[in-house]
Each structure stands twice: as structure tokens, then as C-alpha cells.
Image: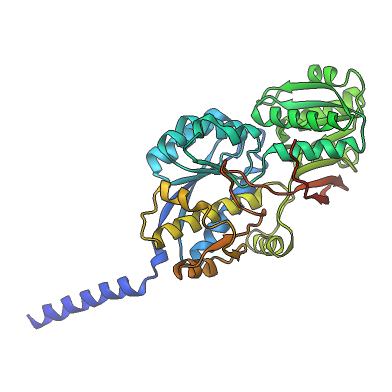
Amino acid sequence: MKKKRRTLGLMMMAILIVVFVTPCWARAEIKVGTLFCYTGPLKEFGPNIRNGAVLAAKQMEADGFKMDLIHEDTETSPIAGVNAAKKLVEIDGVVAIVGPMISPGVVAVAESVTCPRGIPIISPSATSPLISVLPADKGKDMVFRTCPSDALQGVVSGMFASTRYKTASIIYVNNPYGQGLAETFTKSFEKRRGKVLAAIPHDEKPAESYTAELKKALKNNPDVLCAFSWAGNAKIFLKESVEFFKYNSFLFCDGTRSEDIVKSVGAKVLEGQYGTVPASAGGDSNVIFATEYKEAYGKLPPLPFITNAYDAVAVIGLAAYAAEVNGLPMTSENIRDHLRKVAAPPGESIKPGEFKKAFDLIKGGKAINYEGASGSCDFDEKGDVVTPIEIWKYSRGDIVKVRIEHVIPKE
């Protein structure tokens, strides 16, 4: 009998040790889905954007709060994105989603899956102006993004082009992203006395050849051809432009800021050619993120939206933690309701990686203002953020920053 009691006592002690010694972060607090492109025309970008998201989750776990990230491939396709989103919501039970990467994917997923079910999504890279006024999200406040609308990028691109060119033609991917960028560029460029000679769409799926589109776009010999497309499509029509039409004056955007394009078209052809992209934060925030990313993955590639994915995961985690501290279950709605509370003035500034500081402040009842690796995450009433736009160029086979435009156009 004494032996049994002793055995029972040891078992109870072991249970108490597990309960009180095992850190609370050893269990998964919430499940968060990601919808990135690992196949299709944007497959170059997906793995690096995923790395940014994973880095934020790992840092938060090290500082006391764990999220399970569940990753799905959208194949750079709205249809595949919807199917992947349904799996994340209906089978995996995620409370929020980071993504999709592409604007038509955000529209399709929001309309078919997440808005009807009350699941917030934060895209790190969908820039179409349409997302700001998405009908499916009207009154629901479930669609956010950590990148700016092309209502900004298109205007800055048009402003920049007007200082160098008198005429332009555009080849754009025929979806909300390409359409929005082409429209805002045209308005901005022509407001400054430029002239758009042609705007030619192409399908999302890469074609074997784009000579028909190029023939129309280059008919009147524009000063510059705007490649407002995706890298997988553009590397084909840019190469054909050079080889078949002997034309090599281009203006690029975020979707065509690509190392694959350099490999396909050639560094010599691209030398000195400019583009625009939503800018990442400068100063300490950028240095901190770049240092930690390199420590984790060895290299920070010059591709867009890696920082934006990091910030999307960060604000979801901070919002979930704040909800829990306030005595609320970490539901989709409660996380949504705390997104703006953890990433807006006048709270104490939180930089990338400062999650322990953030958690301590939240536990102490203090307000925080997460200032991300990509810039401010102050979501407005439409779920949008405002960040600067970077002018960049291809130089000696690399992608280099030229300058940052802090203009906030109202056009």
C-alpha cells in the first residue's frame, strides 16, 4: 500500500512539474493560414515571402506566443486560391489568413470563402485599388493588406516616367492588378503631358509567344514600354521584344522586379532600366529585419513583399495576444478587432523582433504601435496602409534602390 501511495505521489509530482515548469508557449495558440505562390508566373516570389512570414512566427514563439502557420500554394491562380482557402478554413480551422499574394486571388477568396465566414485576411502583396472597395467586404472589415494600393504606385510611376519620356505603351496582365496599375499610370502620366499610345492586355497564364501583343504595343514606336505584368509572363515578352522587334526601353513595376527576368533577358539589355515597388521601411526597422533575415536564411534577395509578409504575421500575432490578455477568446472577430489597436499611434513604438517588449507592454495594460519591416501598419477604415514608393533599377545584373518617393498622391 505504501509503495502504491509513493508511486501515486511521484506521478502527481511529475504532472505538477509538467504543468508548472513547461512554458505556456509550448502549445499552439492559434492556427494561421498562408496563401502564397509556389507555382505559376509568380513562383519565384512565393518561397521568399513565406520565409518572411515564418521568421515572424518563429520570433514570436521564442518570445512566448506560438502560432501554427499552415502553408498552401495558390498556383498564382484565383481558382486554386479559393480551393486552398476552403481547405484552410473548413479543415484546418485557421482564424486568419496571410495572403493571397495576387489581387484577383484576394477578390476571389474574400468573396467566396473568408468574408462570408468572418475570417480576416491580410495580403502582403495584392496592390489593386479594387481591393479598397471590395463589395464582399463592405461593412465586414475582413480584408487588409500591408502593402499600399497601386493608387499610389501607379501615380508615382507616371510621375517618374513623365520626367524621362514623352510617350509610352503598356503591356499588362489582364486582371485587377494589371488593370489598376495601367489605369492609374495612364492618368498620372497624361496629367503631366505624356501620352499613352497603347495599353495591351494579356492573359494570366503564360503564353508561348506575345508577338501579337508586342506588335500592337510597339506600333507607334513609344519612348518606353511599361511591363505591368508578372515575372513569368514578362520574361517571355521582354525577350521577344529585344530579339524580334529590336526594342529595349522598358519601365518595370513590383511584379516585374525579378531575378528570373535578368537571367532570361540578360543583364546587358536591362542595364539602367527603372521600375517602381512599394518601399520597405528605412532606418532601424529595415536594418533589424535584414540582419535577422540573413541570420535565418543566409541571404535577403532583392524581391518585393518579404517584409510585408513578416509584418502581416506580426500584427496577427500581436492582435491575438492582446485579445487573450483582455480576457477574450482568440477568435477571428476578436483578432480583427485588435489589429488596429496594436499597430497605430499613440502606442509605444514596437520594431521588428521586439515581441517580448510588446507582450510585456500589453500585459501591463499599455498601448503599442507596431512599426513594421515594410513600414507603418496603420490600417485605415478600408484596411489599407500608406507607404512610400521606391524607384529602383537593374544595374550589373542586380536590383538596386535609386530613391524613395514619400509623395502621397491624391489623384
Q: Residue furthest bottom?
A: 2
**Where is residue 120 shown, x and y percent of the image?**
48, 43
Q: Is residue 274 above or below residue 166?
A: below
| Residue at 90 percent of width and 23 percent of height | 245
| Residue 59: quadrant of the picture | bottom right
In the rendered image, the quadrant that contains the N terminus is bottom left
Q: Is residue 117 visible?
A: yes
Q: Nearer the viewer, residue 116 or 364?
A: 364
- Residue 290 lies, in percent from the top left, at 69, 60
Q: Is residue 294 left or right of residue 321?
A: right
Q: Nearer the viewer, residue 249 or 374?
A: 374
Q: Is residue 174 above or below residue 39?
A: above
Q: Is residue 87 left or right of residue 256?
A: left
- Residue 40 rendering spot, x and y as whole percentages: 63, 33
The residue drawn where x is 81% and y is 19% is: 211
As drawn, 360 above or below 96: below
Residue pictured at 50% horizontal, 34% vertical: 138
Residue 208 visible, this orientation: no
Residue 104, image x, y percentages: 60, 30
The image shows a total of numbered marks equal to 0
Position of 260 compared to 19: left or right? Answer: right
Colour style of the rendered protein structure: rainbow
Q: Quadrant of residue 222?
A: top right
Specify the quadrant that holds the C terminus. Answer: top right
